[in-house]
Amino acid sequence: MRETRRWFVLTGAGISAESGVPTFRGSGGLWEGTRPELLASPEGFRADPARVWRWYRWRRGIVAGAEPNAGHRALARLEDHAPSFVLATQNVDDLHERAGSRDVIHLHGRLFGTRCSRSCGMPVQEEIAADVPLCGCGAPLRPDVVWFGEGLPVEAFQDAVAAAEECDACLIVGTSAIVHPAAGLPSVASRAGALLVEVNPEPTALSGICDLALRGGAATELPRLLEMAGISSEPTGPGRV
Ligand code: BJW
């Protein structure tokens, strides 16, 4: 890792778990006791947009009250030290940015973004506090996230593939790695000869192809990984939260 020049990092919900943001799968996850397609698909939104908006407003409240943890901060620190560093996240929260990461690739959109459900192209005005806010064109507004069955933002995904193809080391943090195409990115890096390192308390669909697994929470294991790579995990100067 000390010799790694080009890092590619893929994060998932687990990196924000220790900030108090729930993951999707497993016990206590967002999907427990519900059908994901009711809340995270275009069909679910068409059937009951008010229910979907209630869920997203609840999640916006959780994230607004959350703070980045030592795992987010360790990745921002790694970015400061690495000659080349690309961070792609499946998370829709803004905790990487708030920890100081720059140019984060958001593969699944942004929790605080809103857009027209008909993609009419009109800019979204100040959001009206209605159960289902409407666009100027009359269509319901929707959260600017990527639901099941929808394509990922093309440029974001292309940038992530390019970074995976070119990296020396790929760090996979806090994702169950079952949602595609994001979950396929580490395999791209592996085929290109990169070292694969997983940070997750549980084994995942990708564990079999990883060279190293750090089995613990991201807030503990990422600072430890920085130590292994010879980088101090906490900032020494001003400008970091
Ligand atoms: C810790 C921890 C701690 C706990 N520290 N770790 C190929 C094969 C099969 C299916 C498909 C395929 N290609 C496409 C599909 C269909 C589908 C898919 O993948 N389905 C699978 C479920 C089978 N994919 C799609 O539909 C995607 N679109 C697409 O492919 O477009 C092309 C297309 C177009 C038209 C027709 C067909 C195809 C879009 C996927 C969009 C995903 N959207 C969501 C929700 C929206 C955003 C939001 O509201 O937040 O994104 S679903 C949800 O899952 C969310 C996440 O980003 C995503 C991934 O979850 P993640 O991050 O891995 O979280 P968890 O909860 O699963 O795991 C947490 C992990 O953390 C666990 O491992 C814990 O152990 C760990 N952990 N504490 C570190 N402290």
Image: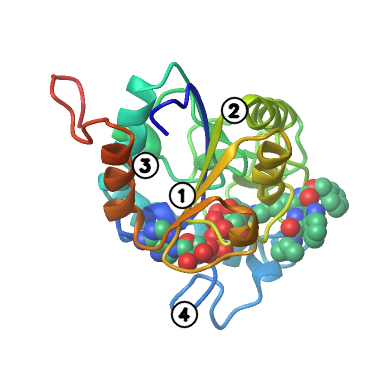
Amino acid carrying label 2: it is Cys
Q: Position of residue 47 (x, y in %)?
A: 74, 67
Q: Residues within 10 Å of mark 2 (few under 14, many from 20)?
A: many
Q: Residues within 10 Å of mark 3 (few under 14, many from 20)?
A: many
Dot 1 or dot 2: first in sequence order is 1
Q: Position of residue 221 (x, y in %)?
A: 32, 52
* As drawn, 121 above or below 197: above
- Alpha-carbon span between mark 4 and mark 2: 34 Å
* As drawn, 100 above or below 63: above
Residue at numbered disc 3: 95
Residue at numbered disc 1: 129
Dot 1 or dot 4: first in sequence order is 4
SS at mark 2 in the image: loop
Tags 2 and 3 in contact by the CB under 8 Å rule? no
* As drawn, 240 above or below 200: above
- Alpha-carbon span between mark 1 and mark 3: 25 Å
- Alpha-carbon span between mark 1 and mark 4: 32 Å
Residue at numbered disc 4: 27
Q: Quadrant of ligand 1?
A: bottom right
Is 234 displayed left or right of 96 in the figure?
left
Residue at numbered disc 2: 167
Amino acid carrying label 1: it is Ala
SS at mark 3 in the image: helix
**What residue sits 64% from the left and 63% below the top?**
205
Amino acid carrying label 3: it is Leu
